[in-house]
Amino acid sequence: MEMARVIVDVPSKDTDRPFDYLIPEELRPWVEVGSRVGVPFGHRTLQGFVVSLHPRPEMDTAKMKPIQEVLDVMPPLSPELIELGEWMKERYACRYISALQSMLPTALKGKAERYISLGDPEASSMDESDGLFAILPESELERDILGFVGQRGEVSLQQLTRAFPDAAAAIKALIGRGKLREHQQIKDKLQKKTMKAVELAVSSEEARLSLASFPTKAQRQKEVLQYILEMEDFLPISQKELLQTLGVSAGTVKGLADKGLITIEDIEVFRDPYRGRHFTPSEPLALTLEQQAVYRSIVRKLDEREHGVFLLHGVTGSGKTEIYLQTIQRCMDQDRQAIVLVPEIALTPQMVERFKARFGDRVAVMHSRLSDGERYDEWRKIREGRASVVVGARSAVFAPFDRLGLIIMDEEHESSYKQEETPKYHARDVAVHRASMTGAAVILGSATPSLESYHAAKSQSQDDFAPQLLEMPSRALGNKLPEVHVVDMREELREGNRSMFSRSLHTAISSRLERGEQTVLLLNRRGYSTFVMCRSCGYVAGCPECDISLTYHQKSNNLRCHYCGYAEQAPEVCPDCGSEHIRYFGTGTQRVEEELAKLFPGIRVIRMDVDTTTEKGSHEKLLKQFRDKKGDVLLGTQMVAKGLDFPDVTLVGVITADSALNLPDFRAAEKTFQLLTQVAGRAGRHHLPGEVVIQSYTPEHYSIIHASSHDYLSFVKDELKHRKALHYPPYCRLILVTLSHEQLPLLVRTAENFAATIKYESDRRGWFGSLDRFDASALDILGPVASPIPRLKNRYRFQCMIKWRGTMDAVSLVRSVAEKLQDSARDSKLQISIDVDPQMLM
DNA sequence: AGCACGCCGACT
DNA sequence: GTCGGCGTGCTC
């Protein structure tokens, strides 16, 4: 094996393939599939990943360059993850390098740093083309530069340009004449965190002996050494702590090192975001009969060490988490590892605590609130085998375990499992595929499974994944699901109540206040945004580059574009008509909070929304306040609906249940049903019975009716009817293609061309152009139409929706047509984005 | 993505 | 006459 195929870190079409490199003899032991390497590429050095190893070919090695360096002791990727990356690039039509990069913490995104050292002093005279320059004496500047470099041996180009600003030309000339040499090296974005650690350099006996003969003027050093000897059993110790405890200076400690009695070394420390927090250990709970049946099914599969997917449909409070914990335990007993995926907003300390309490420091945690450094350290904890369980959001599906036995995806219906940036992968699909590669089991858990998963489980179709359905219809503690009242807000209005609180919700809140119980209020904010409108002329503040309305941010008192980041001062008067009647609309939680204060004087409201939870740890702080009963009401958006478990919450109110129902999204009903069911599950989870009040303007809608009777099956039945009639998932799959360009007419032509080509190629392959026949391979293309955001960052956007069904590879057709189009549109300003199985249609 | 190579306008 | 514009093409 003397040659490696490397995917280099250049996300472009032309470089989206492996490049061949020779492996120098001295690097051979370090180069493996999955290694991160620095390779010469063109005239620079790039980071890349080894995807395969090969014997050196007989010929054609002429243009092959050698790998320059191996960047890690342990390859950050494994052959398994490389293979998963290959699958991802096909499935999601993304670049190979994007797929690989998405598996790693950003700390490992290295970039080349340029270093300068002295070249051959004779070199210049050898160069005949520059002969004239060679005999010319160097300029003063050049001599200074050479002196600067010569003194230091090697400097980074950055340092050099800092020392000699505006000397770029001179440096370049010196390199050109061989007087200076340049080389590039990959430098990680992040350094490992280290600390100065003190250790004895001699045996403790010798150290003790030396104490006797210490010079009297080195009393401080003597003290330090005595202290170190006292701490003998805990060495090495941190220099910082040593200095603090004894009140000595670093020089004193260094004196000891100079005497050869101790050593001071930089050792690596691991950042632990949960350091210093205590977790009360927990024991496995006794399982109910229902739980036992489910547990046995999963364990059977685990014991066979074979791949299998389970869809665990359990009502809120049915004890899914205990199933997770016990199956993980089984998996660990087999010396295998487990991944627990949780939606980002449900990844609360409460959630993490349950896993830490059961499995202690064998648990690694990964979520977006960690700093790059913390995430890198948690990642290494997994890679180096110091953790066997990871609890994390979407990207934790790529946890670098080598003996994966189980992947659990909690709340599997959550749309946040779909990544909205390239690579636009769905963690559920990645999980199922990764598990099938490694013989691991998958548990998809939810009280309201996605229609895709549920339908797949019911139909057991072959071309899809076919999970085994496991049901847990009762609550583990035996308490009943809460009573749900639906209030018709139109009726309220007719009877003169113009408040956002219906009379029954008002009464319900009052009684909780009297009884000292707690209330959770949900404002379903999807479909609203905080925009600025003039009530005199109707002017709405919009982004000058994106054709969408600007969002008002109270904290900074400015208007921002949610999409491109454009910001401007919030106006005092209408910029159009000068009226002062310009108002901030739709803010939601703030307005609800104000109204609550008016209706219930003295009420303590804890508001949780983007404004109050941006700071690190604030989310957690607010929840703790609520748990400590420092608030009567927890008011918030989506984030109050997820997995929270407070014993004294007996009332859940939904301010407007149907605000999302009118959105042009075929999943609107499903999302509404899921949200209502989730939030209703927050009430009465313990000894106190719960009550739920749902306010709605369309109480007759099936998603609201079925949510109020906790009837998932009826909802699925109704919803599937709609999906089937309108040809939507799970009865077909979707690919959303968005084309964008600065010039509208050109874009429209290109988009039409794209749609026509797809249609033509699809026909040519014998696929039906309509989805009406359910037994055939079919592909239908809708559009092009203007995107829901018709202009973004000064680029117009058109989209095509492809609906398809069958065993053929529609993704690769779309990809190849898109690529051809991009080639022929020789102006590279055309952008085409492909979203396979999109979640967001707007 | 960079970065160099290569063919046409405003300047000492 | 040259410096330099950024259009096209390549990177093992």
Image: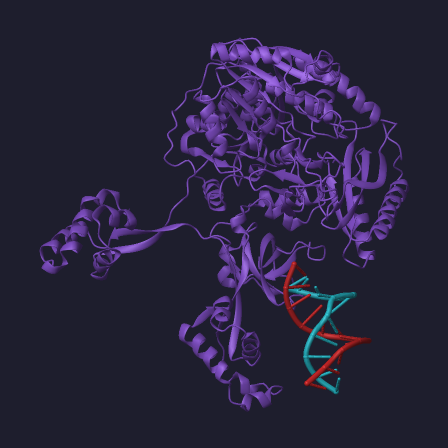
Chain colours: A purple, B red, C cyan
Identify whether A826 is placed above or below A573. below
- The N terminus of chain A, quarter of image: bottom right
Specify the quadrant of the image occupied by residue A220.
Answer: bottom left
Identify whether B8 is placed above or below A467. below
Identify whether A577 is placed above or below A325. below
Asked whether residue A215 appears in the rendered view, the answer is no
Q: Residue at x 53, y 31 (%)?
A: A347
User: Residue A635 placed where, x, y %?
Assistant: 56, 24
Front one among A804 and A676: A676
> In the image, A486: left or right of A687?
right
> In the image, A358: left or right of A13?
left
Specify the quadrant of the image occupied by residue A249.
Answer: bottom left
Asked whether residue A486 appears in the rendered view, the answer is yes
Q: Residue at x 60, y 48 (%)?
A: A101
- The C terminus of chain A, quarter of image: top right
- How many circles with numbers are drawn on the protein? 0
Front one among A179 and A763: A179
Front one among A805 and A164: A164
User: Residue A528 placed where, x, y %?
Assistant: 68, 31
User: Residue A497 placed where, x, y %?
Assistant: 68, 14
Front one among A135 and A285: A135
User: Residue A436 placed where, x, y %?
Assistant: 63, 34
